[in-house]
Every structure is written in structure tokens, then in C-alpha cells.
Image (cartoon, helix red, strand yellow):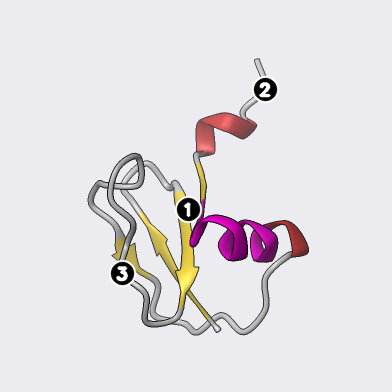
Amino acid sequence: MFDVYLNGRRDLLVVRRGFPIPPGDATGRWRKRKRRVASVSEEIRRAVQRQGYYMRKVGDFRKN
């Protein structure tokens, strides 16, 4: 199970259920999503196992 957080810029942060929000680059005003998330993509699962969290910025996917 995973906890999903969003911030005002609609960035995404995923951490393991019950773990705190990581310090450093992931700081900010994060709001926890109310719904539970049971499964995530394999990319997100590997990132959470490797570094403890997965963070995606909306600007990373915008095309000019």
C-alpha cells in the first residue's frame, strides 16, 4: 500500500504507507489524497523501493 500526496502545483509524491514525507527536495505543502492506493506502476514501485519515495513534477511532462 502507498500514500499519495499532491501539492498546489499538482506535483505527485508517493511513499510507502505509514512512512513520513522525505526531507530535502520533496519538501513543500503536500496534501494527502483521501483514497487508498493499492497498486502503482512498476516504475514507481522500483523508485519507492530504491529511494523510499517517488516524486514527479507536472512540468516534467509538459511539451512546448
Q: In front here: 40 or 16? A: 16
Q: Which mark is residue 58?
A: none
Amino acid beneath label 1: Leu
Numbered disc 2: secondary structure: loop
**Residue 52 locus on image (x, y percent):** 49, 62
- How far apart marks 2 and 3 lie (CA) works out to 32 Å
Q: What is the number of the mark on residue 20?
A: 3
Q: Which residue is mark 2?
A: 63
Separation of marks 1 and 2 at Cα, in angstroms: 18 Å
Structural crowding at the residue carrying mark 1, measured as other residues with C-alpha within 10 Å and reported as few (<14), some (14–19) or many (≥20): some
Secondary structure, magenta segment, majority class: helix
Of labels 1 and 3, earlier in sequence is: 1
Nearer to us: label 1 or label 2: 1
Q: Is residue 21 above or below residue 1?
A: above
Q: Which residues are magenta?
A: 44-54
Q: Position of residue 56 (x, y in %)?
A: 53, 45
Packing grade of label 2 (10 A; few <14, some 14-19, many >=20) is few
Q: Nearer the viewer, mark 1 or mark 3?
A: 3
Tag 1 residue: 12
